[in-house]
Amino acid sequence: MQRNRFVLAAALVGLALSLTTPAATAQAADTPPTESGALLKWLQAGSYRQWPKESAPHRSMGPHQGLVLTHLNPVLDKSMGAKAAAHPKGSAAVKEFQDSNGKLTGWAVSVKTAAASDGGKGWYWYEILGASAGGNVVAQANGVPLCSACHMRGRDFVLTPHPLD
Ligand code: HEC
């Protein structure tokens, strides 16, 4: 009996601790790492699937082949909703590539790493194709010219129409 009380008390302390740090936890989960190895693991863990996202995969309007499904982290979703000209540091988007059977074939990621976009240098760009077969990393740096040149046409480098469809 005494022991059960101890176990219960320990569980309550654990619960209290987990309730006191939700902001820090949410922040860590909502901004992807910008080191390619860590980012790939983070993508594979799939926590971005909890973010606001498009309702169904669709053909890309860009060069991104196959079907795509975009997810915006809560910070970016809110900023797009407010039609902000510049998004806050920590804004991030994850676009899944899928084949016609809905199988995941890769990811494209953008993360704003500075308050100023600076012609695309304030954004980190990452793309991996054929993720299941080891993957071919197409981009993994801030200011990748290929990505920035096209994304420049968007609202602070974000091209997906908002509200998310
Ligand atoms: C020629 C234009 C073009 C190029 C080059 C391009 N994209 Fe995109 N990208 C788009 C379009 C258009 C969308 C909107 C969704 C769609 O239709 O695919 C998009 C969407 C995205 C999204 C979802 C967030 C958003 O901005 O809408 C990410 C992340 C992304 N692209 C990453 C990349 C990365 C990384 C590169 C470089 C390797 C890249 N893109 C190169 C056109 C482009």
Image (spheres, helix red, strand yellow):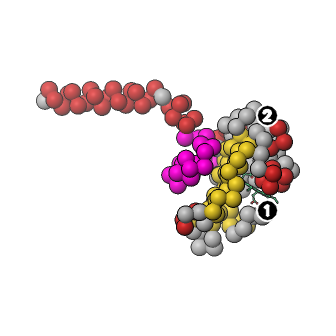
Q: Find out whether residue 44 is within the magenta segment.
A: yes
Question: Does the image show residue 54?
Answer: no
| Mark 1: secondary structure | loop
Residue kind at label 1, given as amino acid type: Gly
**Rendering quarter of residue 108:** bottom right
Q: Position of residue 126 (x, y in %)?
A: 67, 52
* On screen, residue 60 above or below 150: below
> What number is the disc on residue 12?
none
| Mark 2: secondary structure | loop
Q: Residue under label 1, please give it.
A: 62
Q: What number of labels is visible?
A: 2
* On screen, residue 127 above or below 6: below
* On screen, residue 158 above or below 63: above
Residue at left offset 53%, top offset 31%: 24
Q: Position of residue 28 (x, y in %)?
A: 55, 37
Question: Does the image show residue 98?
Answer: yes
**Quadrant of the picture in which ligand 1 is shown:** bottom right
- Identity of the residue furthest to the left in this view: 1
* On screen, residue 115 above or below 42: above
**Rendering quarter of residue 114:** top right
Mark 1: C-beta under 8 Å from nearest atom of ligand 1: yes
Cα separation, mark 2 vs mark 1, equals: 25 Å
Q: Residue under label 2, please give it.
A: 116
Task: Kindly report the secondary structure that dominates the magenta region of the rendered protein.
Answer: helix
Residue at left offset 18%, top offset 31%: 4
Circles 2 and 1: CB atoms closer than 8 Å: no
